[in-house]
Image (tube, grey):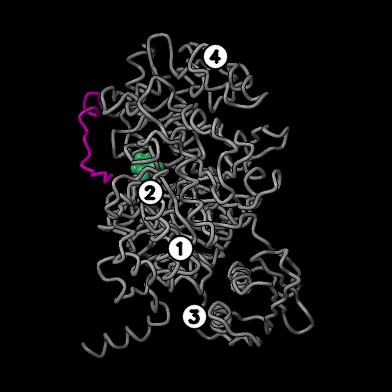
Amino acid sequence: MKHIYLIVFTLVLPLSLFAEDGSRLWLRFSQSGQEKAQVISKYKSPSIDIARQELAAHWQGQPVEFQLDKKLSYLKDGYRIKSDKNKIILSASQDAGLLYGAYHLLRLQQTGADCFNLDMEESPKYDIRILNHWDNLDRTVERGYAGYSLWKWDELPNTLSPRYEAYARANASVGINATVLNNVNASPQILTDEHLTKVKALADIFRPYGIKVYLSVNFSSPKVIGGVKDSDPLNPDVRKWWQDKVKEVYTLIPDFGGFLVKANSEGQPGPQDYGRTHADGANMLADVLKPYNGIVMWRAFVYNPTEEDRAKQAYTEFVPLDGQFRDNVIIQIKNGPVDFQPREPFNPLFGALKHTAEMVEFQITQEYLGFSNHLVYLASLFKETLDSDTYSDGKGSTIARLTDGTLRPAKLTAISAVANIGEDTNWCGHHFAQANWYAFGRLAWNHELPSETIADEWIKMTFSNNDGFVKPVKEIMLSSREATVDYMMPLGLHHIFAENHHYGPEPWLSEAGRPDWTAVYYHKADSAGLGFDRTAAGSNAVSQYFPPLDKVYGTIESCPENLLLWFHHIPWDYKMKDSKTLWDALCYKYDSGVQQVREYQKVWDRMEQYTDEQRFREVQSKLKIQARDAIWWKDACLLYFQTFSNRPVPYDIERPVHELEDLKKIKLDMKHHN
Ligand code: GCW
């Protein structure tokens, strides 16, 4: 018997050398039988050494020669790749550029691109391409669906998990060059001496990969851990405390990036606790960080339980402060005005701050998109925001061009996203959720890349180059965001999620900690119709958009139908563009979402021949959950809205399979750690 086992083992070894568990992400270079490439480099530095090792281990093409060339500084941390007779010259002005260039070559090889006639220059659109981890010090992750935090605070700084370096490498491979380690709902403890030595250990591992560390800070830190009387930004003792603290940080981490701050939002402390403004708070920290070239990313996600439409509050709060912020402050703005919904219009604050640097905050973790159970490819959502024209500086004032320094010369450009990374073996909980980490990095580098190109690269690198696989899977990815909008909240519906955990539907939610945490606040269903009136007759949120968008959104006929119920309260029998009634259109949308997920299942099952057993099965079973959830969403929303519309579900649509009363009883036991 023993012998038989041995033989079997030897035979399968070459194939199963690496478990196909997703742990290798998109960095799945061929492992054996390859010629070692020659790398010619007269330079030595931690980053350059990594670039050299990566190519020496995985590159199968012509010899590559590294050149550091100051003349290329216009490429920032970008690079030039040029074929030259029998070799390839990879040049950059910074060490990190050589590293990014090395990963570019490997990407070309993995995706089967021509690796001979190369001639290209690449430079990143944003200076700071940053992940925001909402990781707590107890290793829970707020809105994290891939297990506990990667950061093992209790073991640091002495024990260093190999995943820290693997994380840095994955980020570098897509050009991500910065990370905020901890939750914006920040524990003051992150700034204790004890924790800072742990942060330093991580920063030391990330540095050779070109990654700078930032921290979220709690505005009350001086009072809570510093023993200062209060945390008033105008109190000299408070400023002194921050000065000493920042000095300590930079002594440990000389290239520390700066602070991310959530202040006076959802119960977090902030300058307003002392009658000061967001500008007072941000500037105090900015002044303290300035001598070290540190920056402050100050979040615009602020809202209070007032009478004012929640969608208007960030704009109302920040526009009057425009021009008051220091030049090392950048306002971090969520893509939409409410909160990372499956679809929102863009946040009207973009472009409205004329004299203040602005950056986008996306959410990669799928708080409102089925957690790590649903396959939703987010490049489409990210691009929708980046390509939105705000008209702030005339036609063509897209959010991409406003934030990348093209339209307004900027000292500081940045783009951020809340990470979906955790301790799970496959990093993100769903194999396809890795694509969203990848896509964020690629778009932060170049927001002009089409979603399709990014999907194509990712599929080929992560799964297979076979056309029989690439094409159908790409179609799934590219349509998945819209399918999800269809089965969750089509036509501009938003925030009808179950309370707190935000997993399933709860459109009937009418009582919560505050009115703007209920679903009825957002959909306003009644016997007359459905939707939130944000026109001049309603909350007038449309007035926050630049012309002509205020009119476009504010007029039913010109409002894009995919945002109709965001801006208008529409009668149930209103005739849509295709002359269906609103009610029928709603029903068909939900149904189409369900049908699309069913189709994904069929397509995926046919992919078995192209992929490994483990990932095939895992994706297959996630798709089952997604299909069940889609039906749950459809039934819950249609049966509930039907109590207002009093109209039948069109007869050619699949019938509901649930009773509304049963769905109302569902209470998922999902803890939300705030
Ligand atoms: O999306 C909401 C989440 C909170 C989060 C908050 C924020 C970190 O439900 O969990 O807190 O936004 O972005 O600050």
- The residue indicated by pointer 3 is 31
Looking at the image, residue 290 sits to the left or right of residue 69; the answer is: left
349 lies above or below 220: above
Q: Position of residue 484 (x, y in %)?
A: 45, 38
Label 2's element? loop
Label 1's element? strand
In the picture, which quadrant includes the N terminus? bottom left
Label 4's element? loop
Distance between the alpha carbons at the discs numbered 1 and 3? 32 Å
134 drawn magenta: no
Distance between the alpha carbons at the discs numbered 2 and 3? 40 Å
670 drawn magenta: yes
- The residue indicated by pointer 1 is 213
Q: Residue at x 57, y 84 (%)?
A: 56
Q: Specify whether residue 627 is in view.
A: no
Mark 2 residue type = Val
Mark 4 residue type = Ala
- The residue indicated by pointer 2 is 184
Res 614 → quadrant = bottom left
What's drawn in magenta, residue-wise? 659-674
Q: Earlier in the sequence, mark 4 or mark 2?
A: 2
Distance between the alpha carbons at the discs numbered 4 and 1? 45 Å
Mark 1 residue type = Val
Label 3's element? loop
- The residue indicated by pointer 4 is 536
